[in-house]
Amino acid sequence: MAMSIDTVAEQAQDIAARLGIPKYDVYGAVVDETSAQVDHGEPKQVKASSRSGVTVRVWNDDGTVGITSTSDVDPLGLEMALKTAYDASLFGAKENIPGFSPEATAPIDHTPHDKAPQAPVAELIERLAAAESTLMKAHPAIAAVPYNGMAQRHIDRFYLNSEGARRQEGHSVASIYLYSKTEQEGKKPRSAGAFRVSRGLSELDIDGCVAETAEKTISHLGYQKVKSGKYPVVFSPDAFLSLVGAFSNLFNAQNVLDKQSLSTAESIGQAIASPLLSLCDDALHPENVGGESFDGEGTPTRRLTLIDQGVLANFMHSAGTAQRLGAQPTGHANIGAKVSVGRHFLHAFSGAPAEREYSLDNADGVIFIDDLQALHAGVQSLQGSFSLPFDGWLIENGKRISIESATVAGDILKVLQSILYVEKELELVGGGIAPRVWVDALSITGE
């Protein structure tokens, strides 16, 4: 970052003293990103951007708070932001006023500052085009890779407040996604995709991404219709975390307080899932590339148990929700026009020992759901119900038969309670890390 946090802190202190502002905090982030997309070996879209954003909160003598955002961290921008936030504070809410996090000055074991060097854009295009070419050669039916992208990002974040809190960290992320499409005469196009992420381009598993996309795409070629009915269902790690993430109001303290959750304040300690399941939110998980060591209020992030062997153990909190519910902040605050609560990196794993183990290798009459679609439309997050199209296979005597098109419907709490088996092997996916999860009969509707 061009400017040190000490410089910003000293400037903020001087300006606040001059303006007569006793209490304020500043959260900021700078993101430098380059990305590329290709189409049949040619660059389709190349982007480079540098984005910065700073959020300033000011408390006046009456204790009400004003918030403003700016993209300038220079003294002039900072002064304008502090002035504007002070003016806004005169109209601030009188109830449930957020304060500083009591943990904003707590020590943090390690804040990352090591970044991988950014590769030239030409290298991104070359590597992505090579991956596209390899994928299209994997099978005659693969006609195109309509969605693809490779990106690299440097992120710097900081937090400071008038009580002496000063936090700063930086990290780098590189990623690739590939999504292929088939064309065969007399057959419907089939698609599949994969995603990989690492600290830098040199460590990115491009070959693994190509191989997974090809394998999934080819496995969908011999598709068949599936009869509607109730089937035992196995969720892939990605599908399971997508479903849990769509109902994250279960664990979100802000949603609970706003009565926009399937949980209430009294739900802590109640069994909401099978004892076979445990679930954490773990920003500091070693597999979480670019994991954050503090949140938007300066609270250190940590491993937070959400479900412990089926029992709802904790909510995700900001400083404000923790104060209202008599809990501790958990490092899940996002600062914007108001403070919101959001998850970092979900980690699902097996809880209590299972009475019986299951395997796809000898399964029969089971639906294996690889990828859930239309989560924005098919989820009723306050009713707990969902009806979602999916990509997947019918497993007959251990053999996979691709399903032409179908939807899965159910209720999230019933799904969690009817878990039959949580496999041991974990897989890193977009929103976290998880195993395959086996669930008792769910409604499947074929065409």
Image (cartoon, rainbow, N blue to C red):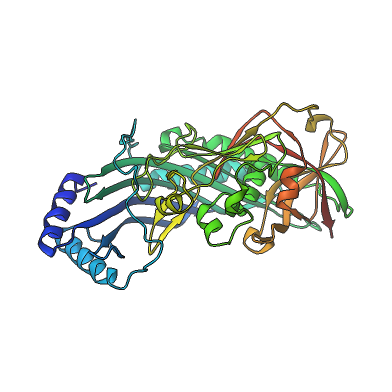
Q: From the viewer's perspective, tell me whether residue 54 is left or right of residue 305.
A: left
Residue 106, above or below 333: above
Q: From the viewer's perspective, tell me whether residue 316 is left or right of residue 82.
A: right
Which is nearer the eye, 124 or 193?
Answer: 193
Residue occupying the point 67% across, 28% down: 424
Q: Is residue 120 visible?
A: yes
Quadrant for the C terminus in the image: bottom right
Write down the quadrant of residue 146 in the picture: bottom right
Residue occupying the point 34% across, 42% down: 103
Q: Position of residue 402 (x, y in %)?
A: 79, 46
Q: Residue furthest bottom?
A: 91
Q: Is residue 190 visible?
A: no
Write down the quadrant of residue 52 in the picture: bottom left
Q: Position of residue 222 (x, y in %)?
A: 81, 46
Q: Position of residue 292 (x, y in %)?
A: 40, 41
Which is nearer the eye, 147 or 107?
Answer: 107
Residue 361, above or below 247: above
Residue occupying the point 52% across, 52% down: 253
Q: Position of residue 76 (x, y in %)?
A: 15, 63
Which is nearer the eye, 60 or 12?
Answer: 60
Which is nearer the eye, 134 or 46?
Answer: 46
Residue occupying the point 67% across, 56% down: 373
Residue 213, above or below 360: below
How many numbered badges does the structure rendering display? Answer: 0
